[in-house]
Image: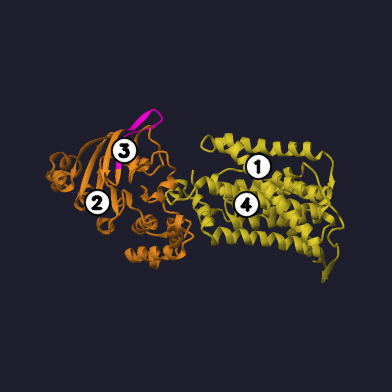
Amino acid sequence: MGAFLQYTVIGLTVGSFYALVALGYTIVYGIIRLINFAQGDLSMVGAFIGWTLLVSLGFQHLPLWLALIAAFVIPMIGTALVNLGILQFAYKPLLHKSLWAILITALGMSLFLENAALQVWGPSINAYPPSMLPSSGFSLGPVHVTFLQVALFLTSLLLMAGLYAFVHGTMIGTAMRALAVDHDAARLMGIDVDQVIRLAFVLGAMLAAASGVMIGIYYTQIQFTMGFLLGLRAFTAAVLGGIGNIPGAMVGGMLIGLLESYTAGYLSGKWETVIVFGVLIAVLVVKPTGIFGERVAERM
Amino acid sequence: MALLEVRDLHVFYGNIEALKGISLDAEEGEIVAILGGNGAGKTTTLRTISGLLRPRTGTVTFQGRNIVGVAAHAIVGLGLGHVPEGRRIFTILSVEENLNLGAYLIRSQGALLRARKAAVYQLFPRLAERKHQLAGTLSGGEQQMLAIGRALMSDPKVLMLDEPSLGLSPLLARSVLKTVREVANDGTTVLLVEQNARQALAIADRAYVIETGRIVLEGKASILATDERVQKAYLGGFEAMTSA
């Protein structure tokens, strides 16, 4: 029982990272029916911008609160700009053309970001400052929880709650949901569809960047290839929850995190990826709409 | 100069010419009906005026300004509302959210938005009863009310309606068209595309008949209603009525 709870704590922590990346997939898919395969790599870009600030520029020596705010906010903005650039130059010319063309372009953008990061930051594993945050924690019965895990989990929840409030509580968020149903009808409401699409790319990138920085802080190691598997896992999470569905991405992310943690705990770490992508295949075969998928409106 | 002037619109889908020189006018406060068979170009005409389609040549002049090339979302802001064919409501949003989006351009003006919403609820009390319901769960008639109400939220000077009575029972259809007349009586110009020619002519001031992308007839609604060609083609004539 103690081991199970311990794995649960780890699973939820990691799952919250996946959930953030999965949200990016889902927001963009909901609006333009594109699987933005660069989503995981955006997370990597965010992690590297954060590393540059903390390590190369020495932000780690600033007061902790200031260092943390900078290490989250600046990567989120930087990554949002990268994603806007991808939208503008790679996707936009193809938006009204074949869906395959844009999908393959998305795969290309994933490779582009990886190789750009390789050029900028090099092939080696870069270390986040290990002693920046306390490694201490507390015990809940048989379970040991670190303050770091709690902080990261709460940060993820906060970001997700913020997104949910934005999408459901503001007029622009409502417009985002309207775009999932009907672009032309949205235009007739006076909604600038291009602007809302840009907003979706900004939000998706910001969440990915935040998860990248959190991954850096949690595992203390990042590499230019980290976005690939992360992106596929988050994609699995989004599909599991029902792609296009925001609560679905959150739940899917947590489930994938838990699944991975239990697999690593009870079987072996080697089986993690096998199980996760087994789930992806199973969902696609048995229930392609995912857990919450029936609420997704089909536009095509 | 009329409030809305359409001159010599030519619109293509690929190589197919859907509109072959459509011209029409709408004056302030009048209801102008556009009649014609399936595929004649009625919907294309409305979609071109509202900026969803771009004509190859021709002009759409609204309040003295050529709006061809202006983005569809900006045209709404100029005062042209469009209730598209098939209603196209946002099914996964609530009734209230649908109406709110209709006032997207004045979203920062809470009081004005609420006042317009109250006016729409007064026009369609059924919507007020169902405001928290998802729009997709409404009946066909209620969805049509929502589509019209949503367009009225932008307080348009010209309201374009594409087949508002399609799929409704005769009773509901009459009630919807009666509401359209009320809206026009309040000073809104209405451009009405209808397959139900009889009822459209009954509430319209003037009408145009489109066939294969061209205007073949135009005139006062009361005169067109008695026109032999219109009767034969769109009103079913005496024989059709008795044999039905």
Report the front residue among A87 and A280: A87
Identify the residue under disc 3: B41
Question: From the viewer's perspective, is A156 left or right of A216?
Answer: left
* Foreground tag (3 vs 2): 2
- What number is the disc on residue A37? 1
Identify the residue under disc 2: B30
Q: Number of labelled discs?
A: 4
Secondary structure under tag 3 reads loop
Give the Cα distance between marks 2 and 4: 45 Å
Earlier along the polypeptide chain: callout 3 or callout 2?
Answer: 2
Chain B colour is orange
State the extent of the magenta-drawn residues as a range: B5-19
Secondary structure under tag 4 reads helix
Q: Is residue B17 magenta?
A: yes
Reply above or below: B194 against A148.
above
Q: Hey, which residue is sitting farthest bottom in the picture?
A: A141
Question: From the viewer's perspective, is A86 left or right of B132?
Answer: right
Type of amino acid at the residue the image marks with label 3: Gly
Give the Cα distance between marks 3 and 2: 22 Å
Identify the residue under disc 4: A203
Q: Residue at x 22, y 47 (%)?
A: B197
Give the Cα distance between marks 1 and 2: 52 Å
Secondary structure under tag 2 reads loop
Q: Position of residue B130 (x, y in %)?
A: 41, 65
